[in-house]
Each structure stands twice: as structure tokens, then as C-alpha cells.
Image (cartoon, rainbow, N blue to C red):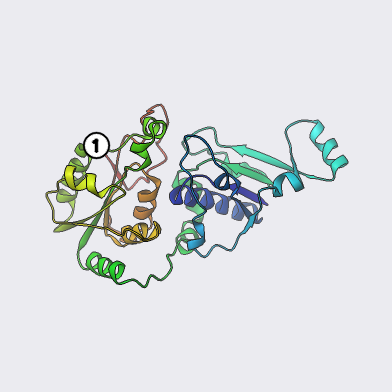
């Protein structure tokens, strides 16, 4: 049994589930989903909801007291004795202490609680086909979305994700993450022009007013404006594009990764965090370009 504690928005949850799923397959055991962090409230943290229910995920979601009710953490020599006395099973706790891929991840034992972000394809590369199948979007019957999807499929579509939102509004989050500069997007578009014939940009953002006032493009472009629709519809439309310019965001990372074009060009920012001491060497797949 592997338990994964979900944290963050849809993109984060997708990384965490994918890592947990791959580990559970490696160990030949079941995966359980802990959503207690999502149900709680924390200062300087954007409140998120459980969002993986848009996918065909069959794993059991445990209640907030499941772990304390049934397990004791294996932290000391006394743990086994206390476990015998209380009748609770022992469970290991793995807290991610590095941002880059931990090569010993698949040495973890059964009955482990995973706490971390696990933002690297390397955590689930062995199960990538399965993960892509699981992360199939539901049928969307909406005229606006269908109109966008047809436009995207008809050209050399390039998704451009400009993430702002809590990266700007919350000072703590802004200091940690930062945003991609207009220069990054200008340089990324230049790379697309050099690599893709007749590209057409489709721009996704949580602050479209800012984009319209601050972003210019040398290639034809369309704004994707889906106010009132679930967030995953943006990721779905991103995944239909043939090429991608992503933000420092797990959301557009997945939009690009799920894209099915075998010849896709994906451009990602070299600077992922304001805190450049974090090792992001395993974050971006080798076939993608960082600038």
C-alpha cells in the first residue's frame, strides 16, 4: 500500500498521483489518495480543491483520519512495540527533501506515505503510457470549446501559457515563484518561428487583461477566453496544440507533456523559481528546450 498526499492545484496533483501510481506498480501494491491537505486551510497558501476526479481514477480516497486511525509512523525503535500494544500497523513516511529526481525513490518500501511534489517525468517514466491513458480528458460538449479545438487542430498551433494569478497577487508566492518575463516569451516565439512553419499561437492566461496590454507576438494569435469553465478545459486545449511555450507552471507542463504530436517543439523557462538554488535539472524532459 502506497498513500500519496495531494497538495497544490491540478498540475501538482497530477505529478503526485503519477509518482505514487508508478511506485505502487513497482511494488505490486495498491495506491490510496490522501486529500487531507486540500481540505485544510493554511496561511499564505492558495486554497485548492481535489481536481483529479476529471480523470478515470479508480483509487480509493481516504478520509482525513484514516492514517491516524489505522497506522503508527515507524519513527523509532519503540514504534514496533507501541504498534503491538495499540494494534495499529506501522507506516513509513517519505518527505521529499530535494526538488530534483531522487534515484532511490523506487527503493521505498510498501506501506509508505508520500509527501512532496515529485515534479519530474523520471518518477513515472516506466508507466508513462498508462499515465497518459489515465489522464485522458472527458468528452466536452460545449460550442465555444469545440470551436477552439477545431481551430487548433486545423493549423500549426502553438500554446502559449502566461501564468500570473497568485504568482502576482500573493506576495509570499510571488517571492517564491516569480513570473516569466515578456522577454522570455519574445525569445520563445523567435525560437518557434525558426523551428515551425506557419505557426499560430493560442494564448492561455489567468490574467488576460494584462496579456492584452503587455504581450505582443510576431505570429498570428488567438486569445483563449473560457471564463466560467473548469480549469482543466485550458489544459485540454493546450494538449491539442502541436507545439508549446510553457510558463513556470506545472499546469502548462502537463498541457505540453500530454500533447500527442511526436515532432512537437516545447519551450520552457530556464528560471523556474526565484530561488535559483533549487535544482530543476530533472524538471524538464530532455527533448524540450529551456531558454
Residue 234 image offset from top left, x and y in percent: 34, 57
Residue drawn at point x = 60 percent, y = 55 percent:
25
With respect to residue 281, does 50 lie above or below? below
Circle 1 residue: 181
Residue 274 image offset from top left, x and y in percent: 35, 30
Residue drawn at point x = 22 percent, y = 39 percent:
184
Instruction: Give the camera-side residue of 158 and 40.
Output: 40
Instruction: Give the camera-side residue of 67 and 130.
Output: 67
Residue drawn at point x = 57 percent, y = 43 percent:
40
Instruction: Say which quadrant the C terminus sits in.
Output: top left
Count of labels shown?
Answer: 1
Residue 39 image offset from top left, x and y in percent: 57, 48
Residue 186 image offset from top left, x and y in percent: 17, 42
Instruction: Give the camera-side residue of 248 and 256.
Output: 248
With respect to residue 70, does 233 lie above or below? below
Task: Work out which residue is located at the far right of the displayed protein and give it.
Answer: 85
Say left or right for 66 vs 43.
Answer: right
Residue drawn at point x = 82 percent, y = 37 percent:
80
With respect to residue 181, does 239 lie above or below? below
Task: Work out which residue is located at the far left of the displayed protein and give it.
Answer: 218
With respect to residue 97, does 39 lie above or below? below
Element type at marker 1? loop
Amino acid at each position: 500500500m502506497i498513500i500519496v498526499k495531494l497538495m497544490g492545484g491540478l498540475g501538482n496533483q497530477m505529478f503526485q498521483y503519477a509518482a505514487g501510481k508508478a511506485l505502487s506498480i513497482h511494488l505490486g501494491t495498491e495506491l490510496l489518495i490522501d486529500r487531507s491537505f486540500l481540505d485544510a486551510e493554511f496561511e499564505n497558501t492558495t486554497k485548492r480543491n481535489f481536481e483529479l476526479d476529471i480523470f478515470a481514477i479508480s483509487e480509493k480516497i481516504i478520509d482525513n483520519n484514516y492514517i491516524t486511525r489505522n497506522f503508527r509512523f515507524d519513527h523509532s525503535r519503540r514504534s514496533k512495540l507501541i504498534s503491538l500494544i495499540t494494534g495499529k500497523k506501522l507506516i513509513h513516511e517519505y518527505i521529499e527533501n530535494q526538488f530534483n529526481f531522487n534515484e532511490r525513490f523506487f527503493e521505498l518500501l510498501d506501506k509508505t506515505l508520500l509527501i512532496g511534489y515529485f515534479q519530474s517525468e523520471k518518477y513515472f517514466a516506466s508507466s508513462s503510457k498508462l499515465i497518459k491513458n489515465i489522464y485522458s480528458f472527458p468528452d466536452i460538449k460545449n460550442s465555444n470549446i469545440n470551436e477552439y479545438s477545431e481551430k487548433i487542430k486545423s493549423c500549426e498551433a502553438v500554446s502559449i501559457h502566461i501564468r500570473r494569478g497568485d504568482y502576482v497577487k500573493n506576495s509570499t508566492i510571488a517571492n517564491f515563484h516569480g513570473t516569466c518575463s515578456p522577454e522570455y516569451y519574445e525569445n520563445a516565439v523567435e525560437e518557434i518561428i525558426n523551428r515551425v512553419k506557419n505557426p499560430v499561437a493560442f494564448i492561455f492566461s489567468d490574467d488576460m487583461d494584462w496579456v492584452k496590454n503587455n504581450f505582443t507576438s510576431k505570429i498570428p494569435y488567438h486569445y483563449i477566453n473560457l471564463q466560467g469553465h473548469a480549469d482543466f478545459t485550458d489544459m485540454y486545449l493546450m494538449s491539442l496544440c502541436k507545439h508549446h511555450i510553457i510558463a513556470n507552471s506545472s499546469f502548462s507542463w502537463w498541457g505540453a507533456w500530454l500533447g500527442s504530436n511526436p515532432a512537437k517543439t516545447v519551450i520552457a523557462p530556464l528560471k523556474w523559481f526565484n530561488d535559483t538554488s533549487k535544482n530543476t535539472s530533472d524538471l524538464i524532459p530532455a527533448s524540450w528546450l529551456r531558454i
